[in-house]
Image: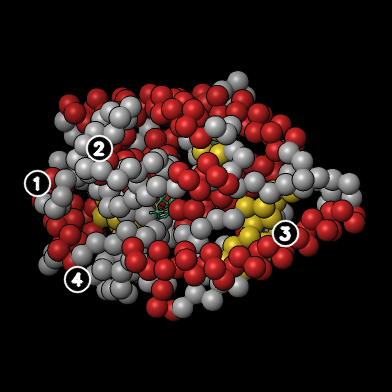
Amino acid sequence: MSCRRCVVLVPAPYQGHITPMLQLGGILQSRGFSIVVAHTEYNAPDPLNHSSFAFLPLPDEVAECDKAFSFTNVVNLLDTININCKLPFKDYLVQLMENVELHSRAHYSVIDLRSENCLPLPECQMEEPVPDFYPFKFRDMPVPLTNEISDKSCAIIWNTLDELEHHHLSIIMKDFHVPIFSIGPFHKMAPMSKTSLIEEDNNCIEWLDKQAPNSVLYVSLGSITSINEKELIETAWGLIGSEQPFLWVIRDNSVNGADFNPQLPDGFEEIIGERGCIVKWAPQKKVLGHSAVGGFWTHCGWNSTLESISEGVPMICRPDFGDQLINAKYVTDIWNVGLEMGSPVDRENVEKILMVGVEAKNMRKKAADMKHKVQNSVKEEGASFQCLNKLTEFISMLSS
Ligand code: UDP
């Protein structure tokens, strides 16, 4: 271990958490910090893709039955991990500090880095508006992490940019009484790196190369959200009805969470031949940055939302749980760069593809403005870049 300051990153074991953590590692490493990624054995990132980071696998002893995704399983899994990994992680930190004392005079500090998009969730009527958070209702709020953040953290790092959420970020800053650093979007601030836990199918890029500009609808519900067979069929009918080219990600476990060979409507094979492409996992950032992609049908995971905004791609929102609900509200009601899909998904909704019509044109213009804001923010004089300078200084000044 070098005597450079070391930042230990501890991602939750899901794609949507591992990706931004690894990106944050890249950002901080470019500022001179050495990076350790402490991770569970379950859903472990591949150290070969990040040879300049140190990796610390923590024995998690997660039972096989807790690995299939469901809300209860996530809660059980995180509980198990918190219990089983606590001691080995603590031992590692003690060892790390001792080594530092022995081999150098450098000060080491571990700060609790969080990139969650989270807000308090008081116990009251779900349909009531949240004070100071127009147009949000309590039902839109994700799971609370407030106490954890304010009790245990000396700073909060947000994977967002000030221009997107200035008002709410300033409220949060007042509430938490710790410095906050909005240095996102991480993927635009970080050197490119391979963060996918699943192999990306790059053939779809060749397919996109053959499509007209802004013509393709990209459909993906992230790494966790699953749908039932009815919704799968409705989606397929919607794509047929849209008469637009489409790129559709159907993960192995994305229909009812089980391994599944999707039974799509009769005739759908032909439609795919004419104007469709289905993959199990796409190189999403490349896809969204491709000139052929004109819209993104998304579950509004925070990474997907930021990636779409960064490329100026309007969205059709189909949120499922947690922060996806509030992200979708931002997309549709505040930034006006998307439409809500509505629930249950029906053919008519799906057919309202945003690539045609006046509404689509306006949305595309707004989305292009947002892309511009992102580009400005990550420039040297931009807000995220400036904030990263402050964060670098902040971590450098922490003493052990
Ligand atoms: N992703 C990808 N290929 C896919 C689908 C998703 O690379 O086919 C990536 C996407 O770029 C994003 C992450 O997986 O970085 C999903 O994170 P998000 O926060 O959007 O949703 P989650 O999976 O956590 O629900």
Number of numbered tags placed on the structure image: 4
Report the disc number at residue 93: 3
**Which quadrant would the N terminus be assigned to in this image?**
bottom right
Q: Quadrant of residue 134?
A: top left
Label 3 SS: helix
Q: Residue at x 46, y 78 (%)?
A: 63
* Beta carbon at label 2 within 8 Å of ligand 1: no
Task: Name the spot of residue 223 as percent of width and height, x first.
Answer: 39, 58
Task: Name the spot of residue 91 as percent of width and height, x first.
Answer: 72, 65
Task: Name the spot of residue 361 as percent of width and height, x first.
Answer: 24, 27
Residue that carries the numbered disc 4 in the rendered image: 263
Q: Answer with mark 4 or mark 2, whichever residue precedes in sequence.
A: 2
User: Which amino acid, by three-letter code, is at mark 4?
Assistant: Gln
- Distance of mark 2 from mark 3, alpha carbons? 41 Å
Q: Answer with mark 4 or mark 1, whichever residue precedes in sequence.
A: 4
Residue count near mark 2 (Cα–Cα under 10 Å), binned few <14, some 14–19, many ≥20? some
Residue that carries the numbered disc 1 in the rendered image: 348
- Distance of mark 3 from mark 1, alpha carbons? 55 Å
Q: Residue at x 11, y 51 (%)?
A: 346
Q: Answer with mark 4 or mark 3, whichever residue precedes in sequence.
A: 3
Residue that carries the numbered disc 2 in the rendered image: 137
- Distance of mark 4 from mark 2, alpha carbons? 38 Å
